[in-house]
Image: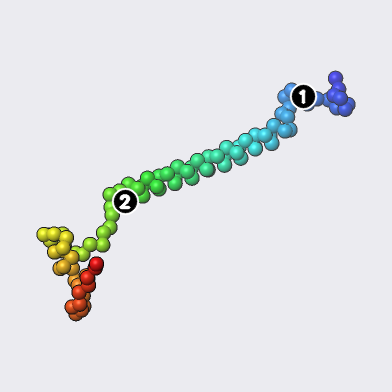
């Protein structure tokens, strides 16, 4: 038995030469997919950790010691950062 170009087909026990290249290609593709999946899982864990640690925290710019004031006006009047530095002029808004 001879092939079309006068060569004999490979014996049944010999592997096809193109098969090893296919296996290498599949292994490379599987490795790339595994690395991308691992990176995505790591990013997800980092995001969840960040969200968990910062859940419910917020920062305000309120003056210290004004939480016990009777009203908002009293708190603002006693805030030293908002008091004029010796300026006694008043502003009127119309």
Q: Is residue 59 left or right of residue 10?
A: left
Q: In the rendered view of the protein, which quadrant contains the C terminus?
A: bottom left
What residue occupies the far front of the structure in this picture? 94
What residue occupies the far top of the structure in this picture? 1
Q: Which mark is residue 54?
A: 2
The colour scheme used to paint the residues is rainbow
Q: In this rendering, which labeled residue sits more in front, label 2 or label 1? A: 2
- The residue depicted at 24 percent of the width and 68 percent of the height is 93
Mark 2 vs mark 1, CA separation in Å: 67 Å
Element at badge 1?
A: loop
Residue 9: image quadrant is top right
Q: Which mark is residue 11?
A: 1
Q: Is residue 54 left or right of residue 13?
A: left
Few, some or many residues within 10 Å of mark 1 (<14, 14–19, 20+): few
As rendered, which of 24 and 91 lies closer to the eye? 91
Q: Is residue 79 above or below residue 89?
A: above
- The residue depicted at 35 percent of the width and 48 percent of the height is 51
Q: Position of residue 57 (x, y in %)?
A: 28, 52
> Which comes sooner in the sequence, label 2 or label 1?
1
What residue occupies the far left of the structure in this picture? 70
Q: In the rendered view of the protein, which quadrant contains the N terminus?
A: top right
Q: Which mark is residue 90?
A: none
Q: Are marks 2 and 1 in contact (CB under 8 Å)?
A: no
Q: Is residue 57 above or below residue 74?
A: above
Residue 14: image quadrant is top right
As rendered, which of 72 and 92 lies closer to the eye? 92
């Amino acid at each position: 038995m001879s092939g079309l170009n006068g060569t004999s087909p490979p014996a049944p026990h010999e592997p096809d030469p193109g098969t090893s290249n296919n296996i290498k290609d599949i292994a490379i593709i599987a490795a790339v997919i595994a690395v991308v999946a691992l990176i995505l899982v790591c990013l997800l864990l980092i995001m969840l950790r960040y969200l968990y640690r910062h859940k419910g925290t917020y920062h305000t710019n309120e003056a210290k010691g004004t939480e016990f004031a009777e009203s908002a006006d009293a708190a603002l009047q006693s805030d030293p950062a908002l008091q004029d530095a010796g300026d006694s002029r008043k502003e009127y808004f119309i």
